[in-house]
Structure formats: structure tokens, C-alpha cells
Image (cartoon, grey):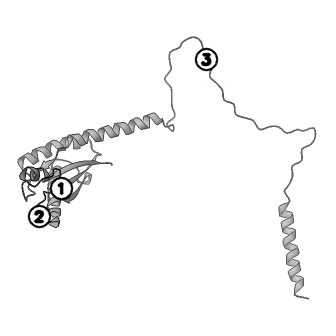
Amino acid sequence: MQKRKPFYAVVVFLVAVFITAGCAKQEVVKKDEGIVPAPVARQVEPIKSSIATPQQPSTTSVTQVNPSSASTVQAQKATSIAQLQSALNKIYFNFDSSDLSESARSTLTKNAVPLTKEPTAKIRIEGNCDERGSAEYNLALGERRAKAAQQYLVTLGVKPGRISTISYGKEKPAVQGSDEAAWSKNRRDEFVVVMP
């Protein structure tokens, strides 16, 4: 019987706590005071005049973003990328070689001009080979071709951090066929503008 008294005391204490905590304080409004509504912000419309006046330049806050200007910036960026991509020409290699020919050096010099004008643009040089040789050999050869072009562009002033390379070996032929006309078009480096 003695053990039950502390239990009952705890139960009575908890019930008292819940009762006092559950009772919310009610606000009493006296009959003659009334309830004053909270002020409501009103929107003021500008006064329109029947007399035509020249438009004043509007001032906008720096924090406001104009959706049309954001889309304009994106459109300009897309146009800039498309123009740069169209300005970059492929270079071609001799059979089983990663040496840059005079023609390839001339093309790379032309490619460096728009790349230096767009200092934030990044490109990927994709090395490719013709179908002859093993897959492993052509992957290594494609990598050497891409690296040769990268090094030459760096000597022309393009920052190395803006250029990445990849080799596709013989996996992405530009022209289908098993003759020298097709093979000569497949031994190439392509330059692809990538998003910054």
C-alpha cells in the first residue's frame, strides 16, 4: 500500500500540469471597446492624365530580375557558343601519325583567334582514327592526336585549363567506308565547345 502513494502523487501532479498547461488565456473584450481591425495595406493606382507626357526613364532596383533580360542573356550566350563552334575547324592527320601537318597548324592558328576572343569558353578536343588497327591502339593514337592539338593551342595563348581532351579511337567515324577517301576523313581532331 505504501508503494502506491508515490505513484498516485505522480499521477495527480501530471494531471495538474496538463490541466494548467491546457488552459489558454482568453482575451476579454469589453462591450464598449470593440475590436479594431488590423490596418490593411492598400494599393495605390497611379493617376492617369489625359495629356500625353514623355516617358520618364524608370528606375529599377538591383534586386529585381527581369525575366526577359535573363532569357536575353541566355540567348546571347547560346548564340556566342554557336558562333564559336562554327568558327572551329577540324584538323586531319596522316596514317598512323599524331604529328601536326602544316595544314593542321594553319587550322589551329585560325582556331586560336576566336578562342582568345572568348576567354571563358571551354573546348574539348576529340581525337579520332580510321578503322584500321586494334581498338586499344587507336584509342592511344587518338589521345596523342588530341594532346598534340592541345599543346599547339597552348603555345598560341589558349589557357590549358580551358581545353580538355578525349579519344574515341575508331568508334566515331565521320565517314563510312573502307577506302582511303573515308579513312582520311576519319583521322581527325574535332573541337567541341562545352558549357562553362
Residue at coordinates 17% horizontally, 66% vertically from top-left? 136
The N terminus sits in image quarter: bottom right
- Residue 43's spot in the image, x, y percent? 66, 29
What secondary structure prevails in the magenta region?
A: loop
Query: Which numbered disc, 2 or 3, marks the residue that appears first in the sequence?
Result: 3
Give the distance between the C-alpha atoms of the residues marked 1 and 3, in whole angstroms: 66 Å
Is 181 in front, or is 26?
181
Q: Mark 2: which amino acid?
A: Gly
Query: Which numbered disc, 1 or 3, marks the residue that appears first in the sequence?
Result: 3
Q: Nearer the viewer's eye, disc 1 or disc 3? A: 1
Over which residues does the magenta segment extend?
Answer: 26-54
Q: Mark 1: which amino acid?
A: Gly
Q: Is residue 52 magenta?
A: yes
Is 91 in front, or is 134?
134
Circle 3 residues within 10 Å: few <14, some 14–19, many ≥20:
few
Asked whether the residues under the numbered discs 1 and 3 touch, taking CB atoms below 8 Å apart as contact, a structural biologist would say no
Residue to which mark 1 is pinned: 127
Against 140, is 180 above or below? Answer: above
Give the distance between the C-alpha atoms of the residues marked 2 and 3, in whole angstroms: 80 Å
Residue to which mark 2 is pinned: 133
Circle 2 residues within 10 Å: few <14, some 14–19, many ≥20:
few
